[in-house]
Amino acid sequence: MTGTPPVEDTLAGCAIIIAADRRSADLAAALERRGAVVQRAPAMSIVPHADDAELLRRTRGLIERPPDVVVVTTGVGFRGWMDAAHEHGLDEQLTEALRGAQFVARGPKAHGAIQQAGFRADWVAESETAAEVGEYLLASGVAGRSVVVQHHGAGSDGLDELLADAGADVRSIVVYRWGPAPDPEIVRRSVQQAASGEADAVLFTSAPGSGSWLGFAEQQGLLEAIRRRAASGRLLLAAVGPVTAAPLYEADLATTVAHRGRLGALARTAIAHFGGGRAPATRTRAGRVEVRSRGVLLDDCYIALSRTGVVLLEALSDAGGRVLSRAELGSLLPGGERNPHAVEVAVARVREAVGPAELIQTVVKRGYRITAED
C-alpha cells in the first residue's frame, strides 16, 4: 500500500484540541472536514465591554477630538469596538473621526479588522508584538501627536507609557478583557489527554490562552509528560503566531508556528503535519505505520483501534524493532488488566484489525516486536 489518505481523510484518527474560545467553531469545522475529531477546551474566556460606560465615554471623546494615530492590537477588539459604536448609534461619527488617522496594526488579524471596517492600515508589525509597534512609532515621531491605542485583554504591554514618555497624547480603548476558563474541568481533561496520548495536537490562538492552558498542566503535574510527547513528535503543539507561541517556548515545549497569523493557516499547519509525512512513522514489512490517538495509518489506509491497541502499537513503533517483553508491554496498557494474557489479547486484536499484513512479530519466549525495516 502506498500514497497518502484521500484529502477529506487526511486527519482521520486524529484527536485535536483547540485551546481557544473566539472563532474556534470555524477552526474546528476546517479540521473536521479532514476527518479529525475536535474538542474545544478554551483555557480563557473573553469578557466584552461593549456596554461599558467608560468605553462609550472615551469613544465620544475621540469623536469630539479625532486622533492622529490609531493603534489596533487585536482584530476581535477592534471589531468589538466598531460593533459597540454601531449598537449605540455612534458608528458613522466614529468612522468620520478616524478617517484621517494613521492606522498601525499589531499583526495580520488586526490588519484584517481594519480593512473590514473600511479603513486602510498604513503599517503592520511583522512580529505581532507591541515592542515592534512601539519602535515603529518612536522612529516615526509621536511628540505632540494624539495616539489612541486599542488594547487586547491582557493590557497595554507598556505601549501607553512608552508613547507618553515620548511626548504623545495617549488615549486608551479597552473593549474586552480576559476571563477564566468557561469550563475548567474540560481544560483539565484536555491536558490529561495531551499528556497521555489521547490527543494528537493542541492548537493555540492567543498568548494568554496558551499561558493559561500551561498553568493547568503545571497544576496537574503533567507538563513534563507533555514536553516529552511534543519533543518526540507524537504531540503537535501549534500556535497561530510567535506571540501566541511565546509562553510555549518559555516552557521549553517544541512548538510549530503557523506561517501566517490566521486561523486558516493554523488549520493548514495541522493538516500539513499529519498529511505531509511530518508525524513520526515507522517503515515496516507491512508498510509505513503512523500511530494516531484513535488508530493507525498503514500506508494510505486508516484502521481504527481501541485505546489499548493504540498504546501497544505506539510502544512497539517507538522501540523501532527492539523486542519488548510481555511485562514491559503490560506495564503500559491502560486499565487494570496488565497481565501477560491481556497483552496477548491486545496483540491478537491489532493483528485482526490490520489483516494479513505482517506488522507484529512474536519472538518466542521473549515478547513482541514490530517488523521494522533496517
Image (spheres, grey):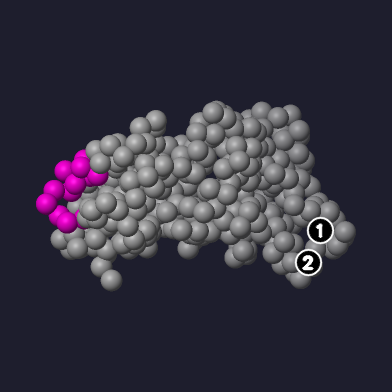
Residue contact at pointers 1 and 2, CB within 8 angstroms:
yes
Q: Residue at x 66, y 28 (%)?
A: 51
Q: Which secondary structure dominates the residues rendered in magenta?
A: helix
Image coords of residue 314 (percent x, y):
35, 51
Q: Amino acid at mark 1?
A: Leu
Q: Residue at x 62, y 64 (%)?
A: 127
Frontmost residue, 254 versus 65: 254
Q: Residue at x 34, y 53 (%)?
A: 324
- In magenta segment, residue 356: yes
- In magenta segment, residue 125: no
Left or right of 185, for residue 212: right
Image coords of residue 274 (percent x, y):
35, 56
Q: Secondary structure at mark 1?
A: helix
The residue carrying pointer 1 sits among few (fewer than 14), some (14 to 19) or many (20 or more) residues within 10 Å by Cα, namely many
Seen in the picture, residue 296 relative to 255 is either above or below; the reply is: above
Seen in the picture, residue 65 relative to 183 is either above or below; the reply is: below
**Circle number at residue 49:** none
Q: Which of the 4 quarters of the picture holds residue 107?
A: bottom right
Query: In this orientation, does residue 226 appear?
Result: yes
Q: Amino acid at mark 2?
A: Leu
Left or right of 322, for residue 115: right
Query: In this orientation, does residue 110 appear?
Result: no
Mark 1, residue position: 163
Image coords of residue 329 (percent x, y):
36, 46
Pointer 1 or 2: first along the chain: 2
Q: Which residues are magenta?
A: 346-360
Which image quadrant: the N terminus? bottom left
Which image quadrant: the C terminus? bottom left
**Circle number at residue 138:** 2
Q: CA distance from mark 1 to mark 2?
A: 7 Å
Q: Residue at x 76, y 45 (%)?
A: 172
Seen in the picture, residue 273 relative to 180 is either above or below; the reply is: below
